[in-house]
Image (spheres, rainbow, N blue to C red):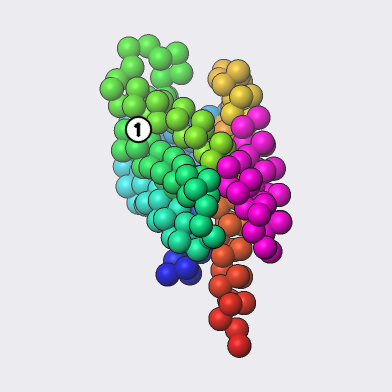
Amino acid sequence: MKKNAFYFGLLGVILFVITTIIAGIVYPNYSHLSQFISESYAVDAPYADPLRFYGYIPSGICFILFGYFSNAYFPKSTLKTLSLIGIGLGYGLGTIICGIFNCDAGCNPNFVNPSVSQIIHNLSGMLTYLIVPISILGFGIASRKWSNSALLSNISLIVAVLSFVFVVVLNQNLDSDYKGLIQRIIEGSILFWILVCALHISKATEHATTP
């Protein structure tokens, strides 16, 4: 059961990254530097539905399962449990909702007569970027008390601060020519944390089963 956290975490990261890369390839003149990830699967984007239903939404499901199985592995702690719920549901469910309710053409940057789907998409994204950095910070604080978790705790704290700082930067520069890069730093830091946490669980599980 504990190994499931590793598999779902790894699979979620791989799916998300590969889907983002493919989305940039199949979208003519798409820029990872200046365009949001959501623009690659907006209502007018080529291959939007395959990207959503075979890439982003499955990755979100994996992140939810990663949070669930990770919680069963780590020592009992209310802060840890709340943090992993925030990460699993915040990032996992947030990714799923954004995939189901994709944004309007070009992601409607000026929010002119937005559709219901656009409103839900933006609200979900906002909540995700608010909840997840705080949850990773909570996990970092909780894990400082555990043995053999100093590195994981330190990485958690660094990722929490890094992602939060760039969330603030992004919201102050929504028209920036580098908003795509800023968003990818946020997403990349969260994905990196999930991968590190999954590898920590995998290594610890292997050592526990080695005679």
Residue sitting at x 61%, y 57%: 196
Boundaries of the magenta span? 137-165
Residue sitting at x 44%, y 66%: 4
> Neighbour class for label 1 at 10 Å: few (<14), some, many (≥20)?
many
Observer-nearest of 91 and 173: 91
Observer-nearest of 191 and 176: 191
Q: Where does label 1 land, which residue?
A: 102
Splitting the image into 4 quarters, where does residue 136 fall?
top right
Q: Is residue 207 above or below residue 200?
A: below
**Residue 50 visible, this angle:** no
Membership of 163 in magenta stretch: yes
Q: Is residue 115 above or below residue 167?
A: above
Q: Is residue 211 above or below residue 158?
A: below
Q: Quadrant of the N terminus?
A: bottom left
Amino acid on which disc 1 is placed = Asn
Q: Secondary structure at mark 1?
A: loop
Q: Quadrant of the C terminus?
A: bottom right
Left or right, 6 with reference to 168: left
**Residue 81 visible, this angle:** yes
Residue sitting at x 37%, y 51%: 61
Membership of 174 in magenta stretch: no
Observer-nearest of 20 and 117: 117
SS majority, magenta: helix
